[in-house]
Amino acid sequence: MVYDLIIIGSGPAGLAAAIYAARARLSFLVLEKMPLSGGQILNTYEVENYPGIPTIGGFELGMKLREHAEHQGTEMIHIEVRHISLEEQGRIKVLYTDGKEYRARTVILAMGAKYRTLGIPGEKELTGMGVSYCATCDGAFFRGRKVAVAGGGDVAAEDALFLARGCEKVYLIHRRDQLRAAGVLQEKLRAAENVELVWNTEVTRVNGEEHVESIWTRKKDGTEQLLEVDGLFIAVGNLPQTELVAKLLQLDETGYIPAGENCVTELPGVFAAGDIRTKQLRQVVTAVADGANAVASVQEYLYKMI
Ligand SMILES: Cc1cc2nc3c(=O)[nH]c(=O)nc-3n(C[C@H](O)[C@H](O)[C@H](O)COP(=O)(O)OP(=O)(O)OC[C@H]3O[C@@H](n4cnc5c(N)ncnc54)[C@H](O)[C@@H]3O)c2cc1C
């Protein structure tokens, strides 16, 4: 069978695309490599910036998006797409998974992003034993303890605030002298009594045998300090999940897929939606907007193909 559309990834962008594709009565399929749909938002404690829903748990929002897509009749298969090739002068896209191939006239790439590592000694060895990339997933294990967060953007600030609710002390360690995080988050950080901002400093090593016991930090002037913490939360940005298309498409200098609001890429019939594309703001609200726009572009492409 050749589908009108295959959506790769079922985060907010992929699920919004599924809702729009179902309503457009396209024959389509969603392929998702994880056992649960929802993408990064599943690991988010609270979402307070999705218009119309003042506060919702990230997991709950992910589940609601999935339910909505399924309610519209979305067919979802939990399998990883490992390779894409083109047939019939690019008119047919072939998606290879372990054991099965899927064919479609159009593809929406909605594979999102994943966390970046620091690459310091002890980080890999102690991941899951005090080193975490998801405060909302692991924060509860550190109730009443001392922890550090490395980073300076929105996610680092949110993580520090979330951890401050249950931890005795939170160090927010940033290599510059000011945060990139939104003003409202910075205000909350300054108001939190158990958050200490550590400026111009990098984490250089994580120490511990069976779990994190301390971290070494280094200031810009070279001063080193040992901080006794039970956990290190790393929030230093995301990596776009573009390996699958790195040979098919030209990526931008930071590895994202160049595509505008219409999600059209340089490859006819291939569209990029959500965190994976070059854009100003990577959030649920922009990801779901992309999902809708991508399907509008798919319809236009299919219409011209006939
Ligand atoms: C800790 C944290 C807190 C956040 N807080 C907020 C917030 O409060 N508000 C907000 O608006 N946004 C928040 N975000 C950002 C938001 O989660 C993302 O912008 C959004 O999830 C992007 O959606 P997406 O669909 O583009 O990608 P993703 O959510 O990354 O989903 C991509 C999906 O594609 C799948 N996939 C990848 N490769 C393949 C493959 N080869 N085959 C099959 N499937 C594949 C992945 O498994 C994943 O399910 C937060 C993010 C994080 C990490």
Image: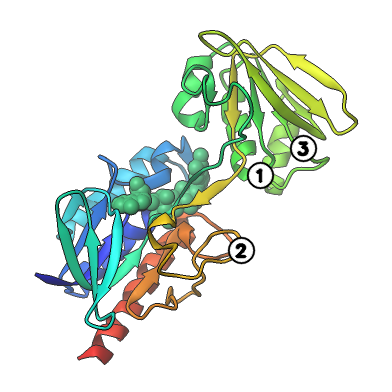
Task: Indicate the amino acid at tag 1.
Answer: Gly
Which numbered circle lies on residue 153? 1
Residue at image point 46% right, 35% down: 45
Q: Amino acid at mark 2?
A: Glu
Q: Position of residue 158 (x, y in %)?
A: 59, 37
> Distance of mark 2 from mark 1, alpha carbons?
20 Å
Neighbour tally class for label 1: few under 14, some 14-19, many 20 plus, Cα within 10 Å = many
Task: Specify the label residue 175 is tagged with.
Answer: 3
Residue drawn at x 66%, y 32% as measured from the top left: 150
Query: Residue 209 lies in what quarter of the image?
Result: top right
Q: CA distance from mark 3 to mark 1?
A: 11 Å
| Residue 73, quarter of picture | bottom left
Disc 3 element: loop
Q: Is mark 1 within 8 Å of ligand 1?
A: no
- Give the percent coordinates (x, y) of residue 90: 28, 79
Q: Quadrant of the N terminus?
A: bottom left
